[in-house]
Image (cartoon, coloured by chain):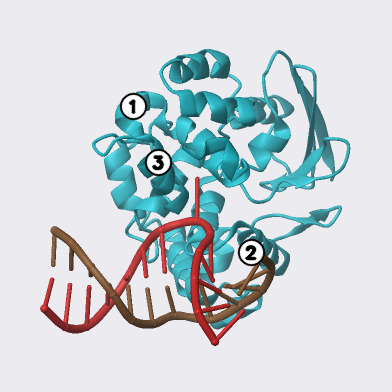
Chain colours: A cyan, B red, C brown
Amino acid sequence: MVVEGKLVIKNISIDLKNTFECGQCFRWKAAGSGTYVSAISDMLVRVSSVKNSLYIFWQGNSIQSSDESIQTFFRIYFDEYTNYGQVLDKLCFNSEILTKAVNFSPGIRILRQDPWETLCSFIISQNNNIPRIKGIIEKLCINFGQYLANGVYSFPSAEILSCLSEEDILPIKCGFRAKYIIDAAKKVHNKEVNLEKIRFMTTDLARNELMKIRGVGPKVADCTLLYAYHKLDVVPKDVWVKRMISLFFKNDQNLTNVFGDYAGLAQIYLFNYMRKAPYSYWKI
DNA sequence: GTCCAGGATCGGA
DNA sequence: TCCGATCATGGA
């Protein structure tokens, strides 16, 4: 049985291109005319934004949830209730580089993605580049996910992947990360690492819990905390962020003691700026 | 051919 | 505790 629904969120400041292509997620695809398509859970989802309204359409095959609970899910997924304008104004007030970054790519919102998909995606991200990360995740979904519609597959569950061996996932060409994915799937499925309990843990405990998985270090754990669990103070430190800090901040400074509770939000704007702005924009 | 990519692990000092 | 080599893969 096909279930469909739609939701319009009014008065929300969001730039879909900047939000979906800033490096926090890997599966939203441009579908023309400013529209983006992806799979969330077992739903095929299509979104577009006009002026200050966000239009969300979904269809699924076996959705148990009520229409109302799905609407609530999307309001939280797109972080409707955080006032980005107010927060960013405050953060930018004392930071010239962040002001440039926000002006360069405005409208980035930090999504609340599925913890398992986020964890698995950032395990794949290690020592890798974004185009290839997307390719590997795509192959993972095609091989082991469920076909939805329009060429879109769901992300395979930890349960599905926990039954596989490293050899089984050779087709996705993830290299040395194969053993990490399998270990993560097993530990998440048997609740040795309980992704639901992590929601209620302090940041430090949650990070240590995630790092019980082989191939999950501080960076992968922090990306999961920020992009799935919405810990907005967490700053994942990759090569770009380290590069940026060495260029624009003093030795004893880090993004946490400059931007406080929203350092992770500052981080995604700065990360995106460093990667996409021409060198002449941000060079000293 | 070499270098690098949203890093983590391992062994040796 | 810290440091360097190594881990697959593919594009530049």
Is residue A195 visible in this depiction of the protein? no
Which x, y percent locates residue A165? 52, 78
Residue for point 57% across, 46% down = A275
C-beta proximity under 8 Å, tags 3 and 2: no
Q: Residues within 10 Å of mark 1 (few under 14, many from 20)?
A: some
Marking on residue A132 = 2
User: Residue at image x 54%, y 76%?
Assistant: A175
Q: Can you tell which mark lies on residue A247?
A: 3
Q: Nearer the viewer, mark 3 or mark 1?
A: 3
Dot 3 and dot 1 within a common chain: yes
**Lower sequence index among marks 3 and 1:** 3
> In the image, what residue type sits under mark 3?
Leu
- Name the chain letter of the residue that bears numbered label 3: A
Relative to the observer, which residue lies in front, A270 or A69? A270
- In percent of the image, x 61 and y 61: which residue is there? A133
Q: Write down the residue under mark 1.
A: A258
Compute the Cα span from label 2 to label 1. Answer: 33 Å
Nearest to the eye among marks 3 and 2: give it.
Answer: 3
Chain that bears disc 2: A
Q: In x, y percent, where is residue A185?
A: 48, 63
Q: Which of marks 3 and 2 is nearer the N terminus?
A: 2
Query: Which secondary structure lies at badge 3?
Result: helix
